[in-house]
């Protein structure tokens, strides 16, 4: 169908296409899908094992011992609920801040949601827009589109009528109109969404460490289960005898108790809850988290790369002054007026409209539009040509040499923090070949230096001071003049003498990394260089955050470990960022760091509780399997210790304030406590059981004694890991102890959990075993704290770099 580009589709045409399903509707993930959340919290390997054990106990009529199944169900429900709450908050914010598309319908321009664009719509494209659907260009005025997010080509592409504009690409200069040719799932960006997809996995040390533990347990749980089952059947009189006499039920129950104790189910839950609560809290502070582990990510960052414009400065630019060079050249005011009034004027050129209004309209005989790649534009009026652009891009080294007349003015103004452009004049017009080749005219002479000023964000200095105090390295990366960037950096508190000109950056990644370690401020950086700089820092072992708001920041933001975009930025930039500052307040970043540190530090603390349980449960299973001893717990009794010494207190501890700085090696530090402490508990319970058997303590009394030892030691481990204690922690630990005493003293509870008076002999044995185990735990914690202190001291210089 042929559509008039001047009028676009009619309302009837749009309705017809929507009814026919030819609209741009495409559901892309802005947060985890409902099915992903349910699958992650419910349909897991270990939930499958727990579910199977739960069914086995129900089938053998031991529902009292199946309490752990309800606990696992509660874990899954709580995990889903917390993530659904976070998802709802994030989706609401994502919807409120979704990009808009401009279309021409019924002869008028209108803004619509990208999903409401239909086939054959006429798109109105301007600088900064992201193309919402594949289209064919029908009008163009200096239209340049950056397709790097889709094709990997970093150079902007000039578009002419008949050319294709791909969805997901970004208009970087000029303006134009295009007719939509493919929509929805058929469009290029949605078919090949790998590069520009919003929801992808953030590298998470917490998640990868926990997955590693679950993988280890998954490998050993099967063989250990067979070992325990065999031992329990032998204790019951052997396989044949146990099966014939129906005595096999207790061995099965004992095996279930051993296996379910090995699984650190709650650790996965606590991590999910901590991430979800952190993301929801940040959402209330106008920070959109595109993936939950990004909350953790910024706390691990040791270098943050900042774009100057829109991050350190407000992004709003204003005309400052015009500095005429020696020799009077008439007509420069009219040239500046033409640039300011040009239909495709960018934000900088538009600042010229007020100081230089058009008094005499002039007709251009030749025009080379501005390009962000070459950083200049040219216009010819008959037999003279005026060029406006970045001084060093138009006049080369002469613009940066203080010994030259132009360089003297430019360097002085740039050092004062002013953004500079130079207006030059050349005799003669622009030929068609000049325009086609985008070639500077011959005989160009500098006439006037135009300066612009930027407003520094009021919160920039305080935020950068915070990062410096936290040992986070700062790199300011900008496309502007290095001296201007350095002046702004000094204004916000960075101690830098001068900026490094990115045109002198080496191509080799290793050499580039060395330059980045030595310098903090870089100017004249191209979009591709920003990406290479991030990659070079990552290659040197740094965890890199990148902030920005422009299209030229999108590649670097996508490549960085944590990409942060301002909500005022281009749609493409926000689409690939992990975090979006919805109100554009740079000062929110310390909140994100604090939230991430709270998550990491608290999960490290509670992980020691869960991993300690996994270690002692695994140790008990192996020891009792090898020694062919009856397992000293019923599953319901382990539910007591799991809930009151690990599960419930971990929930409170995981959400406590915690400002401890992040240091890599979370899993190693956790295991250096959990493994020795878990082995101590396993050996202690084995020795207690041997002693009780020697004293001929009855079965119920022996199990009660084991439960008392594990409960007391578990409460002590909880208190040890909660140090230094405060009022909140004392309430948590004290509350668990009171609940434990209640279970042992309330007749109904004691009867249900088969808790009886252990007798005098067993009581002495319980007391001695508990005291010795607690002393051993204190020794383990003493050496663990020394190890952690050495780790922190060793990591300090690296973090402060």
Image (tube, rainbow, N blue to C red):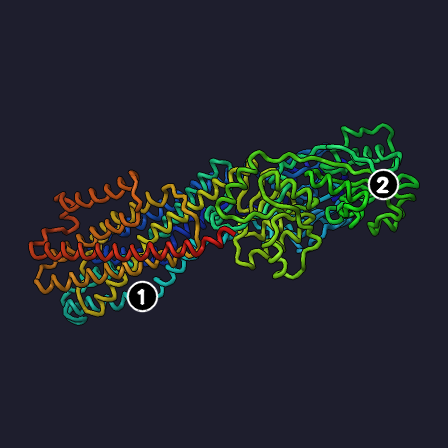
**Residue identifier under label 2:** 386
Neighbourhood count class around disc 2 (C-alpha, 10 Å): few under 14, some 14–19, many 20 upward: many
On the image, the x and y values in percent for residue 657 come to 38, 41
CA–CA distance in space, label 2 to label 1 = 79 Å
Against 205, residue 251 (above or below) is below
Total number of numbered discs in the rendering: 2
Q: Quadrant of residue 216?
A: bottom left
Left of 719 or right of it: where is 281? right
Neighbourhood count class around disc 1 (C-alpha, 10 Å): few under 14, some 14–19, many 20 upward: few
Q: Looking at this view, is 734 or 630 the one in front? A: 734
Q: Is residue 459 visible?
A: yes
**Secondary element at image label 1:** helix
Marks 2,1: beta carbons within 8 A: no
On the image, the x and y values in percent for residue 375 come to 75, 46
Q: Looking at this view, is 444 or 744 the one in front? A: 444
Left of 317 or right of it: where is 663? left
Dot 2 or dot 1: first in sequence order is 1
Against 199, residue 108 (above or below) is above
**Where is the N terminus found, in terms of image quarters?**
top right
Circle number at residue 222 = 1
On the image, the x and y values in percent for residue 755 come to 14, 51
Left of 13 or right of it: where is 219? left
**Secondary element at image label 2:** strand
User: Please, which residue is most extreme toward the left here?
Assistant: 760
Q: Looking at this view, is 499 or 268 the one in front? A: 499
Q: Is residue 183 visible?
A: no
On the image, the x and y values in percent for residue 228 come to 24, 66
Circle number at residue 366 = none
């Amino acid at each position: 169908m042929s559509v008039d580009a001047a009028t676009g589709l009619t309302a009837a045409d749009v309705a017809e296409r929507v009814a026919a399903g030819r609209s741009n509707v495409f559901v892309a993930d802005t947060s985890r899908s409902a099915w992903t959340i349910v699958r992650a919290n419910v349909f897991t390997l270990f939930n499958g094992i727990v579910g199977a054990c739960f069914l086995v106990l129900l089938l053998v009529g031991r529902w009292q011992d199946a309490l752990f199944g309800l606990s696992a169900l509660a874990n899954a429900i709580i995990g889903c609920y917390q993530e659904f709450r976070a998802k709802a908050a994030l989706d609401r914010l994502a919807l409120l801040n979704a990009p808009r598309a401009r279309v021409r319908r019924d002869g008028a321009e209108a803004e619509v949601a990208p999903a409401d664009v239909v086939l054959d719509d006429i798109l109105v494209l301007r600088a900064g827009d992201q193309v919402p659907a594949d289209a064919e260009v029908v009008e163009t005025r200096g239209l340049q589109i950056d397709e790097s997010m889709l094709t990997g080509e970093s150079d902007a592409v000039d578009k002419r009528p008949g050319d294709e504009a791909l969805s997901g690409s970004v208009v970087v200069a000029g303006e134009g109109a295009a007719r939509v040719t493919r929509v929805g799932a058929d469009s290029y960006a949605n078919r090949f969404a790998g590069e520009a997809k919003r929801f992808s996995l953030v590298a998470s040390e917490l998640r990868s460490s926990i997955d590693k533990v679950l993988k280890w347990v998954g490998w050993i749980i099967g063989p250990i289960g067979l070992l325990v089952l065999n031992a329990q059947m032998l204790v019951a009189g052997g396989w044949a005898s146990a099966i014939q006499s129906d005595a096999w039920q207790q061995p099965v129950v004992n095996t279930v108790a051993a296996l379910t104790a090995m699984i650190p189910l709650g650790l996965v839950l606590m991590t999910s809850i901590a991430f979800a609560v952190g993301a929801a809290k940040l959402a209330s502070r106008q920070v959109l988290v595109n993936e939950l582990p990004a909350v953790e990510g910024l706390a691990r960052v040791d270098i943050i790369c900042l774009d100057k414009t829109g991050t350190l400065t407000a992004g709003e630019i204003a005309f400052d002054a015009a500095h005429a060079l020696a020799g009077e050249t008439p007509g420069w005011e009219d040239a500046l007026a033409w640039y300011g009034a040009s239909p495709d004027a960018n934000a900088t050129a538009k600042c010229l409209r007020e100081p230089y209004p058009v008094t005499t309209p002039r007709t251009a005989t030749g025009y080379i539009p501005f390009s962000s790649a070459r950083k200049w534009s040219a216009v010819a009026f008959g037999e003279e040509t005026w060029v406006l652009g970045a001084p060093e891009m138009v006049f080369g080294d002469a613009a940066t040499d203080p010994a030259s007349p132009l360089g003297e003015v430019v360097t002085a103004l740039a050092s004062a923090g002013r953004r500079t452009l130079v207006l030059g004049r050349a005799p003669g017009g622009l030929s068609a070949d000049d325009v086609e080749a985008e070639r500077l005219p011959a005989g160009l002479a500098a006439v006037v230096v135009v300066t612009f000023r930027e407003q520094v964000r009021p919160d920039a200095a305080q935020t950068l001071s915070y990062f410096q105090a936290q040992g986070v390295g700062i790199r300011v990366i900008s496309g502007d003049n290095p001296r201007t960037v350095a002046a702004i950096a000094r204004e916000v508190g960075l101690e830098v003498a001068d900026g490094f000109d990115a045109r002198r950056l080496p191509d080799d990644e290793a050499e580039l990394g060395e330059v980045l370690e030595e310098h903090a401020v870089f100017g004249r950086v191209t979009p591709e260089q920003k990406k290479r700089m991030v990659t070079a820092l990552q290659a040197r072992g740094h965890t890199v955050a990148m902030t920005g708001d422009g299209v030229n920041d999108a590649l670097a933001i996508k490549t960085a470990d944590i990409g942060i975009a301002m909500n005022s930025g281009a749609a493409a930039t926000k689409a690939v960022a992990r975090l979006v500052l919805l109100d554009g307040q740079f000062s929110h970043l310390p909140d994100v760091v604090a939230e991430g540190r709270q998550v990491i530090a608290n999960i490290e603390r509670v992980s020691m509780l869960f991993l300690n349980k996994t270690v002692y449960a695994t140790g008990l299973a192996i020891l009792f399997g090898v020694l062919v001893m009856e397992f000293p717990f019923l599953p319901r009794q382990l539910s007591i210790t799991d809930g009151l010494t690990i599960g419930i207190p971990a929930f409170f501890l995981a959400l406590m304030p915690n400002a401890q700085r992040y240091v890599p090696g979370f899993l190693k530090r956790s295991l250096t406590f959990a493994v020795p402490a878990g082995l101590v508990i396993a050996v202690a319970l084995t020795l207690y059981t041997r002693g009780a058997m020697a004293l001929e303590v009855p079965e119920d009394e022996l199990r009660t004694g084991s439960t008392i030892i594990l409960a007391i030691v578990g409460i002590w481990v909880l208190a040890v890991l909660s140090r230094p204690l405060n009022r909140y922690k004392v309430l948590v630990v004290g509350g668990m102890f009171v609940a434990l005493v209640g279970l042992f003293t309330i007749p109904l509870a004691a009867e249900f959990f088969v808790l009886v008076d252990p007798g005098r002999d067993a009581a002495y044995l319980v007391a001695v075993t508990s005291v010795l185990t607690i002393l051993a735990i204190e020794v383990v914690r003493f050496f663990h704290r020394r190890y952690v202190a050495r780790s922190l001291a060793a990591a300090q210089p690296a973090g402060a770099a």
